[in-house]
C-alpha cells in the first residue's frame, strides 16, 4: 500500500476511534454540561442530603471486604483447577452474571427473606436481610461478585505456574509462594477486577430496589429524587455517584499500568 | 549420591527409569522429544508423583511409594531445576531474583561476588525483561548457586541460545558442579550438548533407558539399532560375517550367512577412500552432496541403502563412484541388538 494511503487510513482509524470514545463518554459529558455549581450546592445542602453517599460508601466497603475474603480463594481455586468439575463452577458464575439484577433482587427475597430458613436463622440474632444495611450488602455482593471472581480467576490464570514451581524449588512453602510470587504477579489484574466490582457495587440498583429500599444508597436516592422532583434535581446525585465510584477504578488502572511498566523495566 | 528408580504414568506410555549419579558427577539424559526425560527430572524434583519407585538424595529418601510412603515436598528437597525458560520472577530485580532463596542477603558479599563472576555486576538493579536470553540464564544459574542446592537438574536449559553462549554457560555449570560436588543431571536432545557436559550418558526412548555409559562408549558401541538411530547413525547396510569379528558387505563375495545382520554407519565415523584394514569399505554412486560444517556431507547409494558420510573435501560429481570406509561400524543382529566382534550379542546396560 502506498505511503499516502497508509497515512490516510491511519488518520481515519484515529478519527473513528475518537468518535467511538466520545460516544461512550457521551453520558458523562452530558452530565457535566447540564450541571452548574449552584445547582449542585443547592441540591446537596439539604439536611441529610449526603446520607445516601455515606450508606453507599459503607456498604461498598463491606462488599469489597466480602469479595476479597470469600471470592479471592474461590477465584484462585478455579484458576488452579483445585475444584472438581471446574466447568460446572464457572457455568454457575456465568448464570449469576447473566441474571438481570432485578431478577436477582426478586430471587433474593425468596432466598434470604424473613420467612425463609436463612431469614429465620439470622432472625435469632435480631438480623433481617430485607430493607436493612445487611440486605444492601447482600444485594451488592450478588451484583458484583461474578465480575470479581471471573476477573480474579483470569488474573491468577495469567501467572505462569512454572514460576510458582521455581519458587517452591528455591525453598518456599505454598503460602510463601502465594505471597511472594502469585499475589504480586496477579495483583494488577486483581486490582482491576476489584475496581470493576466496586463500580458495580456502587451502582447496584436492580436487586437493591427490591430487597434493600432502605437504607437508601446513592442509586436509589437518584431514582427517588427523579420520581419526586424531576430530572434536574437528580443530576447532582448522579455526579456524586460518579465522583465516588470513579477514583478507585482509576487508581487501580493507573497502578496496574505502572506495575506492568515496572516489570518491563 | 542421587538415586532414582521410578515409574511415572504418562498418557502415551509409562516412564520406567533408574539413574544413579554420584556427588560431583554429571549425567546427561539424551533422547528424542517426548521420551520422558523431563518427566524423570520432575519426579526427582518432587513436581510429579511417580506411580511406583524411590528417589533418594545423599541417603535421604525424598520419594517412596511403598509403605511407609514418603514424599518430601519440593520446597524441602533442595533440588535446583533450570529449564529452557530461565523462570526469573518478572516483578523482581536481578538482585532480588538472585537473593530469592532463603537466607541470602541481597546486599551481602556472597551475592555481589557471584554476580561479578557471572558478569552481572552492572545489571543488579535491572528488571528481567531488560535482559538478553544469555543474561537471564546467568541470573537463573546464579540464583541456583546461591540457593545451595544438593542436586542440580537442567532441562534443556540452553536450547535456543547460540552455540558460543551454550558453551560458555555449560562451562560455568560444569565448573560449579565440580566445585560444589553436587550430582547434576542434564536433559538434552542435542548429542553435542550432552557430550560437552556429561561423565555419563543415558539414552532414553519412550520412557525406557536403552543404554547408559560413558558418552564415547555409547556413541561408538550403541547397544541396539534404536540407540544407534537416536545418536546419529544415519545408514544401516546389510553385512555378513567373513571371519571371526570381521564383516563384509552382504552380497559381495560369499553369500550372506545371516542376511539380517546390519552395520550402522555414523557420518562422522567415515573416512574417504577404501581402507579395508581400518573398517568396512563401502562403494557406491554419489546421489547428493551439500556443505556441512567445515566439510561436506555426501549421500552414497550403497547396495540399495543410502549411507551418509561427512568428508573433509568436496566429493566427486553427482553420479560418480565413491569409496569410503566406515571405522568400527557396530553390527546389529536380526532383533536389532548389537553383536560383538565374535558374533555374540553385546549385553546392553
Image (cartoon, helix red, strand yellow):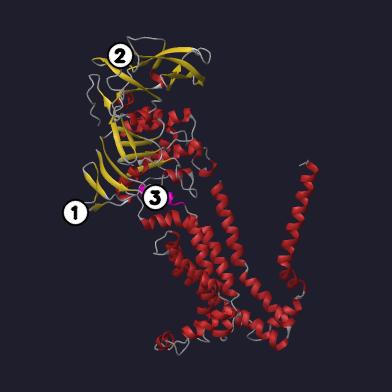
Image quarter hosting the C terminus of chain B: top left
Image quarter hosting the N terminus of chain B: top left
Binning the other alpha carbons within 10 Å of mark 2 as few (below 14), some (14 to 19) or many (20 upward) gives few
In depth, the one of B185 and B94 nearer the eye is B185
| Residue mark closest to the camera, 3 vs 1 | 1
The label shown at residue B254 is 2
Give how far apart the Cα atoms at labels 2 and 3 are.
63 Å
User: Vertically, is A67 above or below A8?
Assistant: below
Q: Which residues are magenta?
A: A160-170
> Which residue corresponds to mark 1?
B67
Q: Describe the element under mark 1 as helix, strand or loop.
A: loop
Residue sitting at 47 percent across and 83 percent down? A111
The quadrant where residue B308 appears: top left
The quadrant where residue B144 appears: top left
Label 3 lies in what chain? Answer: A
Query: Dots 3 and 1: beta carbons under 8 Å?
Result: no
Label 2 lies in what chain? Answer: B
Amino acid at each position: 500500500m502506498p505511503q499516502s494511503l497508509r497515512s490516510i487510513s491511519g488518520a481515519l482509524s484515529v478519527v473513528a476511534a475518537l468518535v467511538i470514545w466520545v460516544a461512550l463518554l457521551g453520558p458523562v459529558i452530558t452530565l457535566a454540561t447540564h450541571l452548574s455549581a449552584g445547582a449542585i450546592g443547592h441540591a446537596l445542602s439539604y439536611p441529610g442530603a449526603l446520607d445516601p453517599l455515606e450508606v453507599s460508601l459503607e456498604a461498598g466497603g463491606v462488599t469489597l471486604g466480602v469479595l476479597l475474603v470469600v471470592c479471592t480463594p474461590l477465584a484462585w481455586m478455579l484458576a488452579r483447577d483445585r475444584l472438581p468439575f471446574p466447568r460446572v463452577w464457572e457455568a454457575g458464575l456465568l448464570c449469576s452474571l447473566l441474571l438481570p439484577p432485578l431478577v436477582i433482587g426478586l430471587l433474593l427475597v425468596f432466598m434470604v427473606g424473613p420467612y425463609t430458613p436463612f431469614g429465620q436463622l439470622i432472625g435469632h440474632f435480631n438480623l433481617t436481610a430485607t430493607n436493612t444495611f445487611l440486605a444492601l450488602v447482600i444485594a451488592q455482593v450478588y451484583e458484583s461478585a461474578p465480575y470479581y471472581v471471573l476477573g480474579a480467576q483470569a488474573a491468577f490464570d495469567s501467572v505462569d505456574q512454572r514460576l510458582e514451581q521455581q519458587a517452591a524449588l528455591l525453598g518456599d512453602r505454598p503460602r510463601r509462594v502465594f505471597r511472594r510470587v502469585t499475589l504480586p504477579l496477579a495483583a494488577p489484574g486483581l486490582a482491576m477486577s476489584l475496581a470493576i466490582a466496586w463500580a458495580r457495587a456502587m451502582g447496584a440498583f436492580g436487586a437493591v430496589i427490591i430487597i434493600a429500599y432502605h437504607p437508601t444508597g446513592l442509586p436509589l436516592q437518584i431514582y427517588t429524587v427523579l420520581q419526586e422532583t424531576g430530572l434536574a434535581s437528580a443530576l447532582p446525585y448522579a455526579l456524586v455517584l460518579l465522583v465516588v465510584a470513579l477514583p478507585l477504578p482509576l487508581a487501580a488502572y493507573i497502578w496496574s499500568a505502572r506495575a506492568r511498566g515496572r516489570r518491563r523495566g | 549420591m542421587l538415586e532414582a528408580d521410578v515409574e511415572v504414568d504418562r498418557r502415551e506410555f509409562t516412564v520406567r527409569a533408574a539413574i544413579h549419579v554420584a556427588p560431583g558427577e554429571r549425567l546427561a539424559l539424551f533422547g528424542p522429544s517426548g521420551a520422558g526425560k523431563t518427566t524423570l527430572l520432575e519426579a526427582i524434583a518432587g513436581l510429579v508423583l511417580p506411580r511406583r519407585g524411590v528417589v533418594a538424595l545423599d541417603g535421604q529418601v525424598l520419594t517412596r511409594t511403598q509403605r511407609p510412603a514418603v514424599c518430601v515436598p519440593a520446597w524441602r528437597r533442595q533440588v535446583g531445576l533450570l529449564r529452557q525458560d530461565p523462570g526469573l520472577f518478572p516483578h523482581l530485580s536481578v538482585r532480588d531474583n538472585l537473593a530469592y532463596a532463603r537466607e541470602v542477603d541481597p546486599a551481602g558479599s556472597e551475592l555481589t561476588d557471584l554476580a561479578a563472576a557471572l558478569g552481572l555486576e552492572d545489571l543488579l538493579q535491572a528488571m528481567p525483561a531488560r535482559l538478553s536470553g544469555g543474561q537471564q540464564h546467568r541470573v537463573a544459574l546464579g540464583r541456583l548457586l546461591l540457593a545451595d542446592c544438593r542436586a542440580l537438574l537442567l532441562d534443556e536449559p540452553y536450547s535456543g541460545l547460540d552455540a558460543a553462549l551454550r558453551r560458555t554457560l555449560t562451562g560455568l555449570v560444569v565448573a560449579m558442579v565440580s566445585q560444589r560436588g553436587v550430582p547434576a543431571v542434564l536433559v538434552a536432545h542435542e548429542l553435542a550438548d550432552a557430550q560437552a557436559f556429561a561423565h555419563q550418558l543415558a539414552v532414553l526412548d519412550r520412557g525406557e533407558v536403552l543404554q547408559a555409559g560413558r558418552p564415547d562408549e555409547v556413541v561408538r558401541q550403541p547397544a541396539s539399532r534404536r540407540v544407534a538411530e537416536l545418536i546419529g547413525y544415519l545408514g544401516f547396510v546389510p553385512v555378513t560375517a567373513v571371519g571371526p569379528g570381521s564383516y563384509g558387505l552382504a552380497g559381495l563375495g560369499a553369500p550372506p550367512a545371516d542376511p539380517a545382520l546390519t552395520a550402522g554407519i555414523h557420518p562422522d565415523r567415515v573416512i574417504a577412500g577404501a581402507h579395508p584394514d581400518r573398517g568396512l569399505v563401502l562403494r557406491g554412486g554419489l546421489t547428493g552432496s551439500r556443505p556441512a560444517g567445515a566439510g561436506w556431507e555426501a549421500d552414497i547409494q550403497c547396495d540399495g541403502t543410502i549411507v551418509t558420510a561427512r568428508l573433509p573435501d568436496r566429493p566427486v560429481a553427482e553420479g560418480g563412484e565413491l569409496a569410503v570406509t566406515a571405522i568400527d561400524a557396530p553390527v546389529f543382529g536380526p532383533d536389532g541388538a548389537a553383536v560383538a566382534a565374535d558374533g555374540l550379542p553385546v549385553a546392553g546396560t
